[in-house]
């Protein structure tokens, strides 16, 4: 294995008991899936690694499924031996969600990627779990509709449901929780359930759809999803504007939202992030705190919205707006934002990113971001800051030398302070990245011991043998 890839930055879970599949179980899986079962080291390593800074922890086998019945077969076979089952989409998570901390079988959904139905009259689409957001939007081309949730990476829809993903469009169209209608799920007993009908609302029973949304693969395997699609606006216009400080940029967005401006996107990049994207994308943006904005509607609506935001921006020291209306021009303006993560990694040669996020009420956002930047400066960290300021969420990428324990420790200490700061402002330990391995320690502080005990009871009820992605979100005991 690649020695650099295996270097630990964040320590992995310790003291866990590995529950490997028996030779008989592997033989049964090979009999059903033939070459679609793999135990090759390279395949196992790929499926035991994500975008987090945790050391890879590979599963014992990987199965590539094509439909819900195949996924159910794997779960039933594994449940008979209490072998863990971990779902894998594209591996873009960053909190250790898919690491096989107790070994087991990884179910790869990448070949289960059909768009099963597009119902424009109902404003919904049904897809298999491995379908990525770009694949869905490609299938929607020419219909006049699009799928709105954009976390940056071309993530799978199943993974996006499992992590309750959000992204750049959230301020206008909501998170994955707002855009999922119904799910097909394989239970820990290998049974297949449908969580809801295709009706736009229901008062019938518990809301199982929302319970699985954000469960990070710990309660069941999501195999199909029916999601909302949205009509393309008549006109879309993008704008970039620079500010003298991060606080000024954030205050501009908050004031715009409070005045009722229906921003389609509102992204903030600090000066260090702009420096990184200039070097990466060969752009010439002013290296100042910058807002990337998008407006949607009729031309008259956009003109009215833009006039209001321009006046607000001017009051906060904002510069001239750089506008783009054509798709090609908007893509050119937005490319730096979409490349921010990988651009930031190049600021420090050989570094790894210990990535974290925070989300607070809008009224506390400017203060929280400003305090975070002061913290970064006071501790001499190299950490670009950017995020979806329209919904109170921002990201910090702390760049460290993985071979320097003092840098790793300083980054961990910063991450802890950021969570404490967010909670102190009435926010959450993670607005977007999910709990995974890293944020489990904060759940009691955020929700209270009784609430976490109730979550643990739900886990035990849904997954009594603890086979679904063990060691994530809440401890089993």
Image: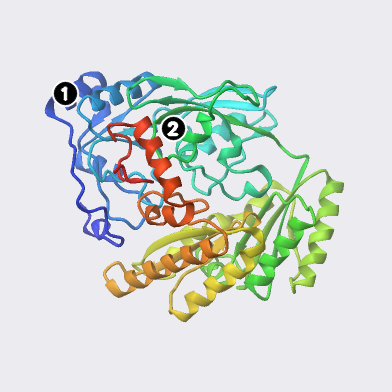
Instruction: Determine if residue 403 is in view.
Output: yes
Q: Residue furthest front?
A: 450
In the image, 347: left or right of 287? left
273 and 187: which is toward the camera: 187
- Residue pictured at 56% horizontal, 39% vertical: 177
Answer above or below: position of 358 versus 103: below
In the image, 127: left or right of 412? right
Residue 27's disc is 1
In the image, 281: left or right of 239? left
The picture quadrant where one finds residue 234 is top right
- Residue pictured at 65% horizontal, 74% vertical: 245
Q: CA distance from mark 1 to mark 2?
A: 25 Å
425 and 160: which is toward the camera: 425
Answer above or below: position of 20 versus 96: above
Q: Which label's residue is closer to the chain start, 1 or 2?
A: 1
Q: Quadrant where the C terminus lies?
A: top left
Q: Residue furthest left?
A: 23
- Residue pictured at 18% horizontal, 32% vertical: 21
Answer above or below: position of 73 versus 350: above
The picture quadrant where one finds residue 61 is top left
Q: x and y percent of residue 378 in the render? A: 47, 81
Q: x and y percent of residue 48 in the render? A: 28, 45
Q: Are marks 1 and 2 in contact (CB under 8 Å)?
A: no
Q: x and y percent of residue 266 in the render? A: 66, 56
Question: Residue beneath label 2, please?
Answer: 130
Instruction: Determine if residue 92 is in view.
Output: no
In the image, 334: left or right of 377? right
Q: Secondary structure at mark 1?
A: helix
Residue 167's disc is none
- Tag count: 2
């Amino acid at each position: 294995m690649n020695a650099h890839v295996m270097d630990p930055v964040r320590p992995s879970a310790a003291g866990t008991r590995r529950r490997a599949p028996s030779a008989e179980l592997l033989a049964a899986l090979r009999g059903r899936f033939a070459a679609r079962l793999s135990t090759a080291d390279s395949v196992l390593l790929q499926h035991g690694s994500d975008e987090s800074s945790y050391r890879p922890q590979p599963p014992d086998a990987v199965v590539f499924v094509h439909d819900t019945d195949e996924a159910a077969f794997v779960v039933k076979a594994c449940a008979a031996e209490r072998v863990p089952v971990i779902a894998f989409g594209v591996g873009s998570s960053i909190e250790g969600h898919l690491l096989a901390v107790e070994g087991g079988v990884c179910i790869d959904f990448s070949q289960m990627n059909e768009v099963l139905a597009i119902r424009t009259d109902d404003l919904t689409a049904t897809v298999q779990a491995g379908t990525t957001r770009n694949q869905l939007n490609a299938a929607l081309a020419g219909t006049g509709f699009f799928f709105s949730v954009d976390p940056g990476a071309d993530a799978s829809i199943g993974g996006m449901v499992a992590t309750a993903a959000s992204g750049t469009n959230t301020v206008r169209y909501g998170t994955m929780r707002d855009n999922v209608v119904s799910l097909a799920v394989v239970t820990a007993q290998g049974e297949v359930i449908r969580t809801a009908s295709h009706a736009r609302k229901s008062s019938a029973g518990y809301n199982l759809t929302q319970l699985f949304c954000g469960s990070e693969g710990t309660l069941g395997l999501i195999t199909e999803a029916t999601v909302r699609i949205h009509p393309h606006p008549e006109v879309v216009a993008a704008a970039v504007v620079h500010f003298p400080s991060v606080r000024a940029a954030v205050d501009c967005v908050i004031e715009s939202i409070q005045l009722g401006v229906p921003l389609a996107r509102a992204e903030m990049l600090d000066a260090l992030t702009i420096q990184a994207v200039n070097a990466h994308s060969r752009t010439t943006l002013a290296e100042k705190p910058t807002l990337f904005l998008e407006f949607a509607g009729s031309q008259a609506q956009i003109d009215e919205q833009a006039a209001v935001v321009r006046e607000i921006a001017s009051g906060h020291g904002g510069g001239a707006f750089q506008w783009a209306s054509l798709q090609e021009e908007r893509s050119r303006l937005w490319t730096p934002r979409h490349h921010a993560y990988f651009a930031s990694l190049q600021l420090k040669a050989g570094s790894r990113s210990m990535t974290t996020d925070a989300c607070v009420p809008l009224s506390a956002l400017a203060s929280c971001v400003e305090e975070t930047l002061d913290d970064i400066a006071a501790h001499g960290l190299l950490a670009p800051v950017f995020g979806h300021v329209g919904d109170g969420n921002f990201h910090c990428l702390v760049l460290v030398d993985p071979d320097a324990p003092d840098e790793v420790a300083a980054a961990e200490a910063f991450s802890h302070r950021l969570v404490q700061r967010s909670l102190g402002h009435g926010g959450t330990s993670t607005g977007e990245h999910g709990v995974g391995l890293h944020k489990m320690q904060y759940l009691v502080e955020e929700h209270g011991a009784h609430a976490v005990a109730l979550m643990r009871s739900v886990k035990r009820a849904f997954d009594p043998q603890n086979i679904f992605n063990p060691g994530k979100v809440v401890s089993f005991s």
